[in-house]
Amino acid sequence: MESDPVTHSSSAAVAAPRLQATLALLLCLLVLAGCSSSQRIETHDPGPTTAEGLSIERALIISNAKQALGTPYKWGGNSLETGVDCSGLVQVAYHAAGIDVPRTSNQQYQTLDHREQARPGDLLFFGAGDRATHVGIYLGDRRMIHAPGSGREVTVSSLDIRYWRKHYLGAAGPAP
């Protein structure tokens, strides 16, 4: 039995757009699924200016962290004279406010009290699973100060960068 070439080609013509539509839908779903792993970093800024409504400890943390801007990254470093890594920056800024914190970002993440919303002076942790591999200090206005890595300097970054949202673990910090 021979198939009718006209019927066969018209069936293929109808199936092709359906296949394209199905593939387009699957592609959209994959893109959306990839985006869903990025989460919004919840923050709470106390007022129109960052310093308004902050405890003296939080103001000192932020002030001392800002003094480190431009300090070179140094793995394991915790001195503004020779360089800092991300957790060393936290140690320096928190110590100046009279608060001792553990040495590494993961120890800080595992030890400090977590909170739902970051306030200026809080720590923001990044990594995978339940292991923090990076930490920054929340400044307010959806910005953090951190020591980003080898060959770079202490800088300020936006929390709205996809990389940070994708690797965000949580926030912790001093008593309100």
Image (tube, rainbow, N blue to C red):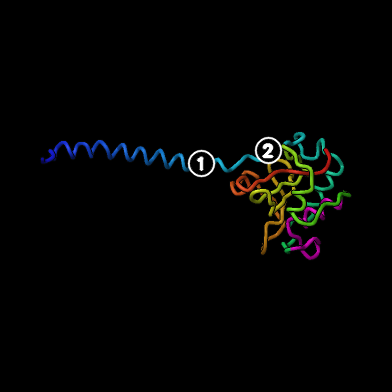
Q: In this rendering, is residue 106 above or below 44?
A: below
- Tell me the SS state at disc 1: helix
Q: Quadrant of residue 116?
A: top right
- Tell me the SS state at disc 2: loop
In magenta stretch: residue 127: no
Residue type marked 1: Ala
Q: Quadrant of residue 6?
A: top left
Please give the name of the residue rendered at 74% of the width and 36% of the height, measured from the top-left corner: 45
Which residue lies under the disc numbered 2? 42
Q: Quadrant of residue 160?
A: top right
Part of the protein shown in magenta: 76-96
The residue sitting at the right extreme is 98
Q: Position of residue 161 (x, y in %)?
A: 61, 46
Nearest the eye: 53 or 170: 170
Q: Position of residue 101 (x, y in %)?
A: 82, 52
Which residue lies under the disc numbered 1? 33
